[in-house]
Amino acid sequence: MCIPHFRYFYMQEICEQYRGLTGRKVSFMILLVVLLSGVGLIALSQGASSVGLKDSFAALFEDSGVAHAIVWKLRLPRIVMAILVGCGLAIAGTVFQAILRNPLASPHTLGIGSSAGFGAVMAIVFGGGLYKEYLIAGNAFLFALLSSSLILGVAKLKRSTPETMILAGIAMMFFFSSLSSLFQYMGTMEEVHEIVFWFFGSLSKVGWKEISMASVMILLPIPLLLKWSWDFNLLAAGDESAKALGVNVTRIRMVGLVVASLITAGAICFTGVIGFIGLVSPHITRMVIGGDHRFLLPASALVGSVLVLTADTLGRTLWAPQVIPIGIVTSFIGVPFFFYLLMKRTREYW
């Protein structure tokens, strides 16, 4: 009679521990939402004009002339796009790290950022007309998908191992970076200036039309990735273990790469290259709440949004009235953390 009672109390203790861990993860996400809201309010009140926090908040709900135009046409679109871009890059980085089982996998280390940059460079050099901005965004999007297709092709020929996909991505990164450098060398001064500005990343040219298009590309695939959370968890144990538990490893890896590439392309096609967010956001989240992708995916999205919005706000305020491109600010955030990962080399949170 003692054994059933022992089992009951043992299982009850495990359930309580699980509820405690889940509660901490949910609390962390709630804290991130509060932090994101606070940073958003600060960003709403910062700018070249003298419209402060009180007037900016009031302008959200009533047409107060100049303040309403500044908030709805300049500041709010920038804030919304920063949240979208951070969310997209962080989720894409989390998926890449899950399907490749590599802590250094990200949209840019896999060459997707470089290929999108080359697509933008081609549109800058050869494009023109009234719709040049959309041509740049569309070309960046197409070349990002082209890069992922090439990686998929190489992986299929070599049986889709994570190592093959990473090496193919690195090759794509160097290839498209070299082509972009060649076009920069051959371009005019105006074209080179526009190319460099695009590679720095900026939220200054986004509007509600761009936000609506980016929202479709970033947000629509997320439910599918959340549905695969358990599969991503099983992949961490290795391909053989995942296959033994019923996971179609090849399909998850292939489709995951395409979906994450689509999200990456949607995140950067209107804003330019924004580095390190897809790398550091999953790591920061994993160190706090662990590697359960049911919580890791949404929490990483929130961390990425906080980082991008904070970086953009700092870029607009540190050297006002000059605006520091967001890619430069995120590099200052990401590079020290990258070296921290290399120096620490611990797997406690991986």
Image: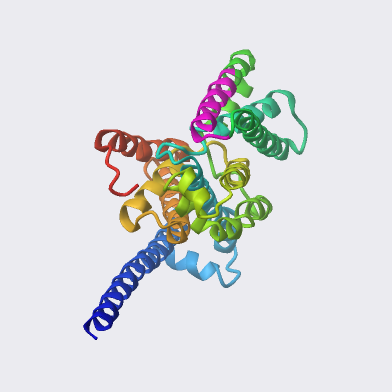
At 76% across and 38% down in the image, what residue appears? Answer: 131
Q: Position of residue 2 (x, y in %)?
A: 21, 83
Residue 231: give x, y in percent of width and height: 51, 54
In the picture provided, is 185 more to the left or to the right than 125? Answer: left
Q: How is the image coloured?
A: rainbow
- Position in image of residue 184 (x %, y %): 59, 18
Extent of the magenta region: 160-178
Q: Is residue 209 visible?
A: yes
Height in image: 186 above or below 37?
A: above
Image vertical order of residue 97 relative to residue 51, above or below: above
Residue 130: quarter of image:
top right
Q: Is residue 346 above or below residue 26?
A: above
Which residue lies most toward the top here? 186
Q: Give the prevailing secondary structure in the magenta stretch.
A: helix
- Percent of width and height locating residue 128: 75, 30
Quadrant occupied by the N terminus: bottom left
Residue 165 belongs to the span the image colors magenta = yes
In-front residue for pair 312/151: 151
- Residue located at (58% from left, 55% from top): 77
Which of the 4 quarters of the picture holds residue 176? Answer: top right
Viewer-closest of 196 and 308: 308
Q: Residue furthest right?
A: 129
Give the camera-side residue of 49 and 203: 203
> In this orientation, does residue 47 appear?
no
- Nearer to the camera, 337 or 59: 337
Indicate whether 153 appears above or below 187: below
Residue at the bottom extreme, as displayed: 1
Q: Is residue 184 magenta?
A: no
Residue in the picture at 64% in, 17% down: 187
- Left or right: residue 199 compared with residue 37: right
Q: How many marks?
A: 0
Q: Residue furthest front?
A: 1
